[in-house]
Image (spheres, rainbow, N blue to C red):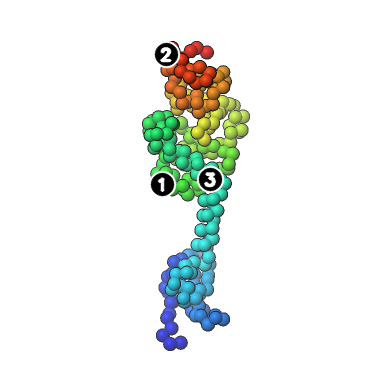
């Protein structure tokens, strides 16, 4: 026991050394440690000093969980939705920027800067891969207090929202899309129902001009009646 180091009271990552715990079968001195998560863990001197043991194993488990979420299917779809929100609000080259960023719609800081925060909020608030993000106030931001996950089918069957349509991963009634885009609701409705356009396309084309069924600009310069 010449110059044996006493690690009692020392901290290594999440572990705090409580006391000496004897010599193990390989002849290494071990220490009883208390992890920040509340579990006890026995670690050798060399593993503690080298930094190879920093927790009871909870840190590693969290890393694995993190990897699972990063590579999981939900995460992939959510990540796309997250990127889409930021693009609409901040990327001037986005085809939707004029209806989002330019209108002052923002992504709250905690979501914008950290996908994990958005991910965790989504999971806690009933996200699954069939749902779309819905801004409750269509003029409000992407933030926890103004967003919810909505089920397309539930929404479609909901009387108040019997015109729910999805575009850019967002669900809104046609009236709400009309407010967002500044395009008359009837124009949107005609474009979708009579011309068979997708909502994305119906939203994209400015309302002052008239387009034929292929979306080509017509000669006259006001919206051709119903
Ligand atoms: Zn732990």
Give the residue number, with chain letter if any, for mark 1.
113
Q: Are marks 1 and 3 in contact (CB under 8 Å)?
A: no
Reading the chain from its start, which is encountered first: label 1 or label 2? 1
In the rendering, at what x and y percent does residue 114 appear? 43, 48
Give the residue number, with chain letter if any, for mark 3.
76
Give the residue number, with chain letter if any, for mark 2.
221
Image point (46%, 32%), residue name: 137
Foreground pick, 82 / 110: 82
Reading the chain from its start, which is encountered first: label 3 or label 2? 3
Q: Secondary structure at mark 1?
A: loop
Nearest to the eye among marks 1 and 2: give it.
2
Foreground pick, 22 / 102: 102
In the rendering, at what x and y percent does residue 127 appear? 56, 43
In the picture shown, does residue 152 fall above or below 117? Answer: above
Q: Residues within 10 Å of mark 2 (few under 14, many from 20)?
A: few
Asked if ligand 1 lies within 8 A of label 3, the reply is no
Q: Secondary structure at mark 2?
A: loop
In the rendering, at what x and y percent does residue 225 appear? 50, 12
Foreground pick, 47 / 147: 47
Rounded to the nearest angstrom, the CA distance separating label 1 from label 3 is 17 Å
Nearest to the eye among marks 1 and 3: give it.
3
Reading the chain from its start, which is encountered first: label 1 or label 3? 3
Q: Is residue 181 visible?
A: yes
Image point (50%, 78%), residue name: 30
Q: Are marks 3 and 2 in contact (CB under 8 Å)?
A: no
């Amino acid at each position: 026991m010449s110059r044996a180091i006493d690690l009692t009271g020392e901290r290594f990552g999440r572990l705090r050394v409580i006391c000496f715990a004897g010599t193990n079968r390989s002849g290494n001195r071990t220490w009883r440690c208390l992890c920040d998560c509340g579990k006890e863990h026995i670690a050798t001197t060399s593993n503690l000093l080298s930094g190879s043991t920093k927790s009871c194993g909870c840190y590693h488990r969290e890393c694995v969980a993190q990897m699972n979420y990063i590579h999981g299917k939900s995460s992939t779809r959510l990540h796309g939705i997250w990127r889409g929100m930021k693009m609409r609000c901040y990327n001037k080259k986005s085809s939707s920027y004029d209806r989002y960023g330019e209108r002052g719609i923002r992504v709250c800081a905690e979501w914008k800067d950290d996908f994990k925060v958005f991910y965790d909020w989504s999971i806690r608030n009933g996200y699954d891969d069939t749902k779309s993000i819905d801004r409750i106030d269509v003029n409000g931001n992407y933030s926890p207090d103004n967003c919810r996950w909505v089920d397309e089918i539930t929404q479609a069957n909901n009387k108040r929202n019997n015109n729910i349509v999805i575009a850019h991963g967002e669900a809104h009634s046609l009236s709400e899309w009309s407010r967002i885009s500044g395009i008359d609701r009837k124009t949107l409705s005609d474009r979708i129902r009579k011309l068979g356009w997708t909502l994305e396309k119906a939203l994209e084309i400015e309302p002052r001009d008239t387009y034929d069924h292929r979306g080509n600009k017509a000669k006259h310069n006001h919206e051709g009646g119903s």
